[in-house]
Image: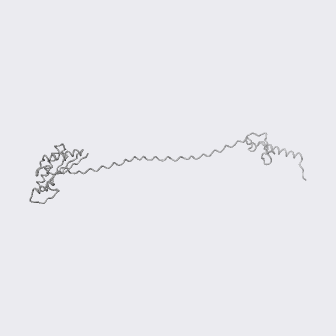
Amino acid sequence: MTTKPTLSATLATAAMTISLAAFEAGAQGYVTSAPAGSVWKSGSGGCVRTGYWTPTLADADCDPDHVPRAAPAAPRPRAEVAPPPPPPPKAEVAPVAPPPPPKPAPLKPVPLTLAAGELFTFDRATLTAAGRAKLEKEVVDRVKQDYSDIRVININGHSDRLGGTQYNQRLSERRAEAVRNYLVSRGFDGSKIETYGYGKTMPVKSCPDQKNRKAVIECLTPNRRVEIEVQGTRR
């Protein structure tokens, strides 16, 4: 036998439903629809607030202006790109001085050759007046004009082949000494003058033997000579 619910029971059930909805609405601040519990909206789409509504219960769909907006996410910090290191300083290269110009090759001294006949009489070692004048012009004046400094003066005496070897050796030495003594008397430093005698060992001309001795002597004249070699700094 089915028993129909009485009117009082139906009202009681409805009251319990409304009370539960009111409780849930109070908890949410809006009137909600059962049984899902979602916010109830009117036909115009608006939400109905309850008396319990406060801004802290604001719903984003109903009251977006009262819902605090989430702070925008902080931008990701950009990775700091370290600037490239400065290039290493270039090593300072000391300027290279150009090489000095090559020094001119020293001039090879050219011996000044004077014939013995211009300085001495035949078979003698004493300077004649003409011989001293010759030395003054050809040696003294020229050396003083051409050289600012004298390192050494070599005086080499030579003879012809007439006569013995030892005699001619001594004659060539005496003639070289006579020239040296004259240069010293004219102000040259004697410590820078060297004398040598070569006798008849270094002839520059050959003459055949013949009966005419005077002709032979004349032919051998180039071998009777004095060579003067000056070494020093030219002006």
Relative horizontal placement of residue 209, taking residue 3 as reference (left or right): left
Would you identify the image quadrant in which residue 63 lies? Answer: top right
Instruction: In the displayed orientation, state which residue is furthest to the right.
Output: 1
In the rendering, at what x and y percent does residue 41 appear? 79, 45
Relative horizontal placement of residue 176, taking residue 23 as reference (left or right): left
Instruction: In the displayed orientation, state which residue is furthest to the left.
Output: 211
For this rendering, which residue is in front, 215 or 50?
215
For this rendering, which residue is in front, 72 or 13?
72
Number of marks: 0
For this rendering, which residue is in front, 199 or 112?
112
In the rendering, at what x and y percent does residue 95 appear? 39, 46
Q: How is the image coloured?
A: one colour
For this rendering, which residue is in front, 152 or 69?
152
In the rendering, at what x and y percent does residue 222 appear? 16, 54
Tell me: residue 169, above or below residue 191: below
Would you identify the image quadrant in which residue 23 lies? Answer: top right
Relative horizontal placement of residue 70, taking residue 180 as reference (left or right): right
In the rendering, at what x and y percent does residue 169 appear? 13, 53
- Picture quarter with the C terminus: top left
